[in-house]
Amino acid sequence: MSTASTASVAVTSPVAASDRWTRYNATVLTICILGWAFDIYEATIMQLVTPILIKEWGITPATMGTVTTISRWIGLIGTFAFPVLADLYGRKPALIWAILGYSIFTGLTGFSTGWIMLLIFSSITRIALAGENPVGMLMVTETAPTKWRATALGGLVGGYPFGYMLCSLAALVVVPLWGWRSLYFLGILPALLVLWIRIGIKESPRYERVTAQMLKDGLKKQLDILSPAREYPRETLIASLVYFFYLFTWLGWSAWMPFYLATEKKLGFQTMGSYLSIWMFCAIFAYWICGWLCDVFGRRWVIPAFAIPASGLLIVMGQIDGPSSLFWVGLATNFLITGSFGTGLGYTAELFPTQIRGTGVGASFTFGLGVASLAPMIMGWIATAHSVAAGLPLLACSFLLLAPLFVWFAPDTTRKELTDFVGQKAG
């Protein structure tokens, strides 16, 4: 979304955000956290049932890695389209469309009878899943108190481990009773969240004020997918690299850790599910802690402090065999990876003005995720030829590169007021 002539927009003072929590921004954060949680619940199902499907359908790890990667590539449609729709029609309606879409199609995925049907249904579901994440991030970025924006963004993505934990716990209960399909059928329930969104929150005030100012100046919203790269090339590149480094590591780690624990390390499905449930429960606190530390000390130093040791532990993870060692090293590794994930991803929304924030986030998220989506497939190839452990140093390298990116290249926007119009200088 851009304007007919961005240069003609009068640069006005930014819409100041309160430094205090209100009922409105707390409700927005709560709803968006739940949206992320249910989003990740849906996305985690395939990861958890991978060992079951490989055995039941007689397919290889490489096939499952390919299914995961291709579905994520198709999901890039939603990664770009929904934030752009949020610029054109508003954050609230885009959020409703995304949640309703992934709820319906997750339920349909439960009827898959082979990997081709799984690929088709999961790809359609992924379009809506991939769209919900950036739209929720836009809402929280624009409504959270400026002083605590990094904490709020950390808490938002804290819905990620909460959803992962819910899926792991549900798998422990329903899979032994009704099979893996029941996890997909339960995924219909998040559709109820749409009702709360329609009743519980209004549109982002910052978005409404920018829209009102544009109407007053006689400017129309229009699709301009090149506007972020044209107006903010450095910020677009940095945002794309942030997404790539985070998501390449996370997608490779989360997609294959269940298989690694259950099959490669011979811990079994129940033990694997228990480990992941505990890791993700602890990760909920990691998001809030890292977000708070970033608000106090700035992302420039906090994110490298999480990324560097996490990279080392990823390599260590592939060299140990004992169940106890796997649990504790995995817990620490997951804590550090997920801790910086929320405020790190949320940082990208702060780089663009409200006028093109959705388009900027969507474009950079699409590029970064598109390349990072190779991770499950690459890890699948490595697992088929060697082992999952052999691929962990590759994931470690990607995560390590976050440190120099934030120390030397990425501007620290923590506790700085957001900009609203193209050309407006940060306050």
Image (cartoon, rainbow, N blue to C red):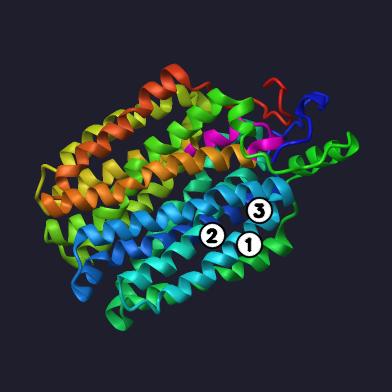
Query: Which tag is nearer the camera, tag 1 or tag 3?
Result: 1
> What whole-number distance in Å separates the C-alpha atoms at marks 3 and 2?
22 Å
Q: Position of residue 44 (x, y in %)?
A: 37, 60
Q: Which mark is residue 27?
A: 3
Disc 1 and disc 3 in contact, CB within 8 angstroms = no
Which residues lie in the magenta part? 345-357
Q: Which mark is residue 97?
A: 1
Name above or below for residue 349 compared with residue 261: above
Magenta region, mostly helix, strand or loop? Answer: helix
Counting residues from the start of the chain, the first of labels 3 and 2 encountered is 3
Report the residue marked by disc 2: 128
Q: Amino acid at mark 2?
A: Ala
Q: Position of residue 371 (x, y in %)?
A: 39, 41
Q: Which sits in the foreground, 234 or 316? A: 234
Quadrant housing residue 226: top right
> What whole-number distance in Å separates the C-alpha atoms at marks 1 and 2?
8 Å
- Give the side of residue 352 with respect to residue 380, left or right: right
Local SS, label 1: helix
User: Dot 1: within a 10 Å radius of its alpha carbon, few (fewer than 14), some, or many (20 or more) residues?
Assistant: some
- Give the side of residue 298 with respect to residue 114, left or right: right
Name above or below for residue 300 compared with residue 100: above
Counting residues from the start of the chain, the first of labels 1 and 2 encountered is 1
